[in-house]
Image: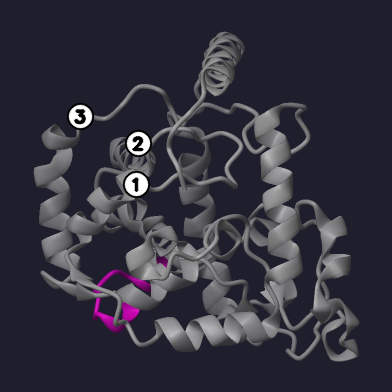
Amino acid sequence: MSWYWTEDLWCQKLCQMMDSLRQRSILLAKHSATSHGVLETPCRDYNAECERQKSVEEFYRLQHINQTYDFVKKMREEYAKLDKAEMSIWECCELLNEVVDESDPDLDEPQIQHLLQSAEAIRKDYPDEDWLHLTALIHDLGKVLTLPKFGGLPQWAVVGDTFPLGCAFDESNVHHKYFKENPDSNNPAYNTKNGIYTEGCGLDNVMISWGHDDYMYLVAKENGTTLPSAGLFIVRYHSFYPLHKEGAYAHLMNEEDKENLKWLQVFNKYDLYSKSKVLVDVEKVKPYYLSLIEKYFPAKLRW
């Protein structure tokens, strides 16, 4: 991809930036902080009319068409090899400066800033839950899948809301209409509420669309992290908005899933509402997060 921008494109980007800043100012004036110290602003508005939203919808069109049961099975087998790189958690955080998430209608800042903004907001409100601070820091590290070293996967195979394969596509999925072009829609075995699963089978037994969530979960688990199960659940399902925002697919959860979902819903407030143009001083907070990484992860991980 070329990063050369024409004068017209620079003007377009500048206009978008000014509009974004103006909208943020309006929102900050209208909305007060909640008891958790995060802003209840209308994030994830997929219907707003702007160029950014059009590109987000095109992203979901491609995702809904191409994410099939067989595709996810293939991706899980390929990335289970953990043969793409060997590096520390912090080294991966720094790599994220090269990643932009095209599926996010709210976020234009480098990914590492979103990680630190989320982690610092949680740290302020839950000072004793250090595992949750670290979970926030690492939750999006799987987005390195877009980089050539990790396969250079297209955005639709890395980011965006996740959803189960092997059962009917619930209408709560954003831009649901595009699922009709997914080959799995023509498989009768996949087109009932339970599909190939049984009620209460547990999400660990459900094939979820492939992306950065499942990849980072795989990396953390296979490298022997000591994060609690709730931390791994957050990493693996934080993009599963049909479940934790709309309550869809809840019939597939087991009791452990239901307990862990409570922590995911806590985390989600910070994942959504901590996004800000006020940047975190990386060098100032780095020593704290390095200490958590040392506590919960080995020095080097296979990716």
Image height of 29 relative to 52, above or below:
above
Helix, strand or loop at disc 1?
helix
Q: Callout 3: few (<14), some (14-19), or many (20+) C-alpha neighbours within 10 Å?
A: few
Q: What residue is drawn where x is 66% and y is 86%?
A: 70
Image height of 77 relative to 114, above or below:
below
Identify the mark nearer the N-term, 2 or 3: 2
**Residue 281 numbered mark, or none:** 3
Badge 3 amino acid:
Asp
**Residue 117 numbered mark, or none:** 2
The quarter of the image holding the C terminus is bottom left
Badge 2 amino acid:
Gln
Q: Callout 2: few (<14), some (14-19), or many (20+) C-alpha neighbours within 10 Å?
A: many
Nearest the eye: 194 or 45: 45
Q: Callout 1: few (<14), some (14-19), or many (20+) C-alpha neighbours within 10 Å?
A: few
Q: What residue is drawn where x is 29% and y is 69%?
A: 227
**Residue 5 drawn at (x, y percent):** 48, 28
**Residue 229 drawn at (x, y percent):** 39, 73
Badge 1 amino acid:
Glu
- Magenta stretch: dominant SS? loop
Region rendered in magenta: 221-230
Spatial CA distance of label 2 from label 3 is 10 Å
Location of residue 172 by image quarter:
bottom right
Task: Count up the numbered dots.
Answer: 3
Q: Name the residue under label 1.
A: 98
